Image (cartoon, rainbow, N blue to C red):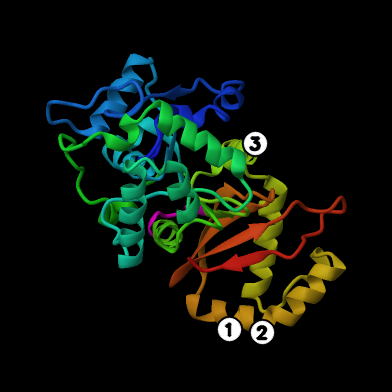
Amino acid sequence: MVLIHDGALHSATWDDVWPIFCKDFHVVRYDRRGFGRSPTSTMPYFPVDDVSAVMHAAGVQHAIIVGSSAGGGLAVDFTLKHPEAVDRLILSGPQVLGLGQSRYFVDRTIAMQKRELNGDVENAIRDDGRAFAPGHEAALKRMVALLTAYPQDLHHSDDMARPAPPAVPLLSSIKAPTMILVGTHDTPDVQAWAGAIDAAIPGSHRVVVPDTGHLMYLEQPQHFVQLIEQFVAARQHPDRETALRRYLGSLERGQPNYEDMTPNAAASVRREMPVILALLKPMGAIKSIRFAYGTETGADAYWVTYAHGRAEWTVAPLTAEGKMQSPGLRFP
């Protein structure tokens, strides 16, 4: 696993999740140029090449890539350039090259950075409000301590970094299983970016994490690790796929198999059935069904390709009697 930090802190930002991940993974983290203990570059360079160099030095040929904020954008750039090296892609509050920024976001960021550079670091972060959800005082203090100990995180120039091509037009080419995490208290821009990235990467999975801001791994490290470990470990369950195939077959015949569901699920689906059938009718016959990912609630998600479109179906664990519990449907 490779951890790529954001554009405000250095690799110590991962301190709370580092020992937990290290129990199950060979984990690599590094200070990007100009952050932490890495000096600012005096020569032009490509940040994507630094990721490759770090992995090579650590003896890692392929990995789970985890990127936060601007580090998420770098993780995307690396995935586009080296798809064979990425087993899974996890983006936390990602900022991807090519996504527009609102005037509100730009003005707010400039105002915060001015206060930070003038030494009012804690109040600048607190008043801006995007980094952490209310009440996470320990996380805020930790961020302030890191910026105080390593002021170059705020003051360095990255003029020598050469950008990768805009990633947005290329997102649809990403094949690695991808999860996008975004906090409920992050800025509207970041939340919008997360939705746009989710829509563009085929089969991606977006999770909105309650009671977190932009740096959720400082606020809720255990939950952050749990979400990632669940995503990485997720495997399809043959009994759920079989149940879904039976259910979808019954929909195609216009005779939903309510007997294969729990009573509550059957009652709920029966109420929704006219809408479900109306949505699916124009899509035509089913062409393929494939496992996509495991959700944070333990359900299996499947991409179902129809003659004229695609839908995502989720199947929760079956009951002991093999009954389905409210299969879920959404359109990407």
Residue under label 1, please give it: 278
**Based on the displayed image, in which of its 4 quarters is residue 147 positioned?**
top left
Residue under label 3, please give it: 222
In the image, what residue occupies the spot 42% across and 55% down? 202
Figure check: 264 above or below 124: below
Does the residue at mark 2 contact the one at mark 1 (Cβ under 8 Å)? yes
Q: Is residue 189 magenta?
A: no
SS type, badge 3: helix
Q: Amino acid at mark 2?
A: Pro
Secondary structure character of the magenta stretch overall? loop
Does the residue at mark 1 contact the one at mark 3 (Cβ under 8 Å)? no
Q: Is residue 304 left or right of residue 261?
A: left
Give residue 273's position: percent from left, percent from top.
69, 80
Q: Amino acid at mark 1?
A: Ala
Give residue 106's position: percent from left, percent from top.
31, 59
Please state which of residues 201 and 137 is positioned toward the viewer in this rendering.
137
